[in-house]
Image (spheres, rainbow, N blue to C red):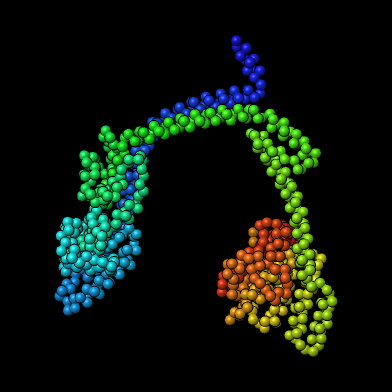
């Protein structure tokens, strides 16, 4: 029997053997690992949710304490600010001009509140400073509205006002209450209050009240719904609801919303308790004494865990079935793709580069895609090399056509120069000398490359001609690192940039132009900068292929030709960049690789 089973397995063939092996290797780990993970998840997730609720409560309380601490410091402002403290001691009724004094002090105090207190924290909604002697508001954060009737008849008798005054300078957190003094709609707020006490006489001069709107208060935390019916409450020191998932409960007694569960609110600063229906997680603020309470229904908590476990089991079964199906396809498709791949590779070996393997199945399919990409890249590179050579020849021809090649012009200019010298025309002689140097440089056709020294001398002559033409309208500064003078670079890289700076940048400016030409070596590259203090350009001009139109151009190679020649000779990663702002000059920067004298055509 044993021999018969072994022989049957050996006679299954490659495909069936692979299917059987894949199925065994997949089913056994899936059943073992899936069952173990499901059991562990069921045991651990219940405590994880409760721990997360506890940490969320703690974080809410920390946020409240961290946000209210600055308010405690602000509540001491009237005692520390000399101007406000003097206002608190005044008896305005005894002054010769009480209304004038009150108005002046009200403006001063209001400015201090708005500029020194309201800017200190975004949590504050409003601030009011109350003076007991005259029972008036000497300063408040807004001037739009104040309920004078409420101030005169009810404000002083408010329980929280009396509590603040009784505490004689201690901070008093005030739970949720309607803001009736400076609000037209009595919006609910919580407050920090402190009595202002004369440190010498110990007399109570008044109080300061800092109000925080409920809408701003709830930005200190995010509502995390651990289950659909999870409830969160923030309860103040008077057992009133400061915040709830249900906005209609704001300001109501907590006993009305919680019923018998209100008993769980009392106790330690941090506790987790439960009854037959719910878990209760409570944390207490050390600054305000308020309590954050999260109530999680037990049935929803465990139902959530069970749902997750069932989802995991279903997902594992689906993955198991899909894995078995995938193993069957892998086994069935492994031989045919190998045969096709072998035939295609033979065609490639014979030189047929247009072969497309186009196998989609399994790892062999991945190999075929890689080979197809490789062949496509080879064909693309061949075509790119051909196109670049054609473009390079075209650009070189355009550059040669732009040069003033006839030596007849150079020789004629020399004759005119000697005639000017004999006649004592020094200015004409200098101009012709500079122009002859330009012609001699442009007539050199033996190579596209020159030394940095040659390029700089050409620019010196060129700018000298422009200086004669524009009659000392601009000044040129050369800052050339001596170490780069013998490096090689492409001809005519700087001339179009200088031309643009003079013809466009200095056109119409009411001051003398300054042209700076800097060349240095930086990180293995040759960096050439042409900067001017001219009228600059708008960003839209920089984005166009030719940033500057130059009607009087002597050389028409242009900005686009510079970029194209750099790309063809040096490749990607090098080129020309320009920065400019209107009325703030332009800076053009060319970056090319360093080339020594012995090199020609290949960057270092």
Q: Nearer the viewer, residue 336 or 44?
A: 336
Q: Is residue 423 left or right of residue 155?
A: right
Residue 202 found in image quarter: bottom left
Residue 477, image x and y in percent?
Answer: 65, 74
Residue at image coords 31%, 39%: 296
Point out the residue furthest to the bottom here. 423
Q: Quarter holding the N terminus?
A: top right
Q: How many marks?
A: 0
Q: Is residue 231 above or below residue 435?
A: above
Residue 225, image x and y in percent?
Answer: 36, 43
Residue 263, image x and y in percent?
Answer: 21, 40
Residue 220 seen = yes
Q: Nearer the viewer, residue 291 or 514?
A: 291
Q: Quarter holding the C terminus?
A: bottom right
Q: Nearer the viewer, residue 227 or 204?
A: 227
Point out the residue furthest to the top here. 1
Residue at image coords 69%, 63%: 563
Residue 451 seen = no
Residue at image coords 64%, 28%: 332
Q: Nearer the viewer, residue 425 or 387?
A: 387
Residue at image coords 67%, 83%: 471
Residue 201, image x and y in percent?
Answer: 16, 66
Residue 360 found in image quarter: top right
Q: Is residue 546 left or right of residue 32?
A: right
């Amino acid at each position: 029997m044993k021999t018969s089973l072994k022989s049957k397995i050996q006679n299954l063939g490659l495909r069936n053997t692979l299917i059987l092996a894949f199925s065994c290797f997949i089913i056994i780990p899936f059943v073992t690992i899936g069952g173990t993970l499901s059991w562990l998840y069921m045991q651990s997730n219940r405590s994880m949710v409760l721990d997360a609720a506890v940490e969320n409560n703690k974080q809410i309380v920390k946020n409240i304490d961290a946000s209210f601490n600055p308010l405690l410091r602000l509540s001491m402002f009237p005692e520390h600010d000399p101007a406000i403290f003097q206002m608190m001691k005044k008896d305005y009724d005894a002054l010769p001009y009480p209304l004038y004094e009150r108005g002046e002090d009200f403006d001063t105090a209001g400015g201090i509140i708005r500029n020194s207190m309201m800017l200190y924290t975004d949590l504050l909604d409003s601030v009011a400073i109350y003076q007991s002697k005259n029972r008036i508001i000497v300063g408040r954060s807004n001037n739009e509205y104040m309920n004078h009737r409420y101030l005169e008849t009810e404000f002083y008798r408010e329980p929280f006002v009396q509590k603040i005054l009784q505490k004689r300078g201690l901070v008093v957190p005030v739970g949720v209450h309607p803001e009736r003094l400076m609000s037209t709609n009595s919006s609910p707020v919580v407050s920090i209050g402190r009595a202002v006490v004369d440190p010498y006489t110990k007399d109570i001069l008044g109080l300061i009240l800092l109000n925080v709107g409920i809408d701003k208060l709830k930005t200190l935390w995010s509502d995390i719904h651990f289950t659909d019916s999870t409830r969160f409450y923030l309860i103040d020191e008077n057992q009133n609801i400061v915040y709830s998932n249900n906005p209609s409960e704001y300001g109501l007694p907590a006993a009305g919303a919680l019923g018998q569960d209100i008993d769980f609110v009392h106790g330690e600063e941090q506790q987790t308790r439960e009854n037959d229906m719910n878990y209760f997680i409570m944390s207490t603020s050390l600054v305000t004494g308020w309590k954050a309470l999260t109530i999680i229904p037990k049935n929803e908590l465990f139902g959530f865990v069970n749902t997750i476990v069932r989802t995991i089991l279903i997902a594992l079964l689906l993955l198991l079935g899909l894995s078995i199906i995938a193993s069957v396809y892998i086994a069935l498709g492994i031989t045919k793709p190998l045969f096709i791949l072998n035939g295609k590779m033979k065609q490639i070996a014979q030189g047929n580069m247009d072969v497309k393997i186009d196998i989609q199945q399994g790892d062999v399919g991945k190999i075929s895609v890689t080979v197809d990409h490789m062949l496509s890249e080879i064909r693309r590179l061949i075509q790119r090399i051909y196109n670049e050579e054609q473009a390079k020849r075209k650009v070189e021809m355009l550059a040669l056509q732009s040069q003033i090649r006839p030596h007849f012009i150079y020789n004629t200019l020399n004759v005119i120069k000697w005639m000017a010298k004999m006649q004592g025309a020094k200015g004409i002689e200098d101009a012709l000398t500079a122009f002859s140097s330009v012609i001699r440089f442009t007539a050199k056709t033996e190579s596209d490359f020159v030394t940095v020294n040659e390029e700089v001398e050409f620019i010196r002559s060129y700018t000298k001609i422009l200086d004669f033409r524009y009659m000392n309208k601009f000044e040129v500064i050369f800052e050339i690192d001596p170490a780069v003078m013998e490096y090689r670079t492409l001809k005519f890289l700087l001339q179009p940039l200088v031309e643009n700076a003079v013809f466009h940048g200095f056109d119409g400016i009411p001051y003398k132009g300054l042209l700076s030409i800097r060349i240095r070596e930086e990180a293995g590259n040759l960096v050439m900068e042409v900067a001017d203090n001219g009228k600059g350009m708008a960003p839209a001009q920089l984005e166009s292929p030719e940033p500057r139109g130059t009607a009087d151009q002597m050389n028409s190679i242009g900005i686009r030709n510079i970029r194209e020649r750099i790309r063809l000779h040096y490749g990607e990663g090098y080129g020309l960049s320009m920065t400019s702002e209107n009325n703030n000059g332009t800076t053009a920067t060319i970056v090319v690789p360093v080339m020594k004298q012995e090199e020609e055509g290949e960057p270092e």
